[in-house]
Amino acid sequence: MADLNNKLEYVNEKAKSNSKDFILECEKRYQSIIDKIVKKIIEEDGREIIMLAGPSSAGKTTTAKRLKEGLGSKGVTTYVLSLDDFYLNREDIPYLPDGSQDYETVHALDLERLENDLNSLLRGETVKTPVFDFTTGRRSDTEFNTITLGQEDVVIIEGLHALNPIITDKVHGKLLKVYINVSSRIYDENCDLVLNKRNFRFLRRMIRDYKFRASSVDNTYKLWKNVTAGEEKYLFPYRDNADIKANTVHLYEPCVIKNQALPLLRDSEVSVEFREDAEKLCASLERFFDIDENEVPKDSLLREFLG
């Protein structure tokens, strides 16, 4: 983006000269985004729903958490719900022409339940929203989120489809639509591309999947094609519906992520079909100066992926 110096040489110079200040600068930039959204929310009167959308690994979970904390510091009671909890039971998920189930489509959600729950919340009614169990592939029969929105309370709905008119047009009340993504690339001094926006998100997801979802790099690669295809079809056409757009890049992140990413990308078990891309990512990451992961703040958005 225009407000960021996204040159490799700039990133490396900042990382070498004073990595702590560089990290602080990046973290303050992200916090300013949170503060801006919080300010926009509290300018409104009455209960409100924040629709927070973004592609995979854009940082929706951390952004929702930080918004809740920011609003809480202003005395606003805030709840966070994930659209993933409104998934249909596994046997009811729509099928693609090839016979596989389409988990990316908006129609994989229980749209009727979602519409009823959101409108009931806006009326101030007590609602028991579902909790989806990804182990069984079904919504829990015993676990719910019980919510009653007070007159000035806020609920944040985060998920891939949060800006889809199929959902938002059915909600009768105040909505603030927020779209987040990694919206910066890194170029070198010759204007050659070093990392693109999807590289950032893939690296974040690869590390998170490996550390927290027992998923190999190979499996992340195999899933990535369908994930990005779903974003192209079900998210990107609606990003201009957002009231606020935010770039969640942290320019220092390649300097930190490389230390976990390089060993994973060099794993001999990465399939031949993905090996060329893995080698290109390795070559790009090797161009960044190292920053010790221990320097990353515990509440950083990057901790969503690094742990």
Image: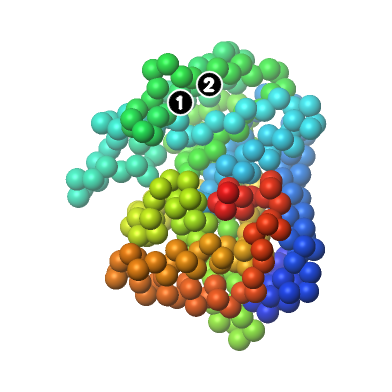
Name the residue: 73% across, 74% down: 16
Q: Amino acid at mark 1?
A: Val
Query: Which residue, given by chain and number where applicable, does mark 1 sit on?
Result: 131
Q: Position of residue 126 (x, y in %)?
A: 57, 13
Q: Residue drawn at (71%, 25%), measured in percent from left and top?
A: 77
Say which amino acid is labelled 2: Asn
Q: What's the distance in space between the residues labelled 1 and 2, CA to CA?
A: 7 Å
Mark 1 and mark 2 in contact? Answer it, CB < 8 Å: yes
State which quadrant residue 106 falls in: top left
Residue in the image at 30% along x and 69% along y: 273
Quarter of the image that includes the N terminus: bottom right
- The vertical placement of 192 against 169, above or below, is below
- Horizontally, residue 269 falls left or right of residue 79, namely left
Do we see residue 120 in this rendering?
no
Residue assigned mark 2: 145
Q: Secondary structure at mark 1?
A: strand
Query: Residue 142, relative to residue 98: is it above or below?
Result: above
The spot of residue 293 in percent (x, y) is 64, 59
Which residue occupies 42% across, 29% down?
132
Q: Is residue 91 above or below residue 244?
A: above
- For label 2, count other residues whose C-alpha is less than 10 Å away and answer few (under 14), some (14-19) or many (20+): few
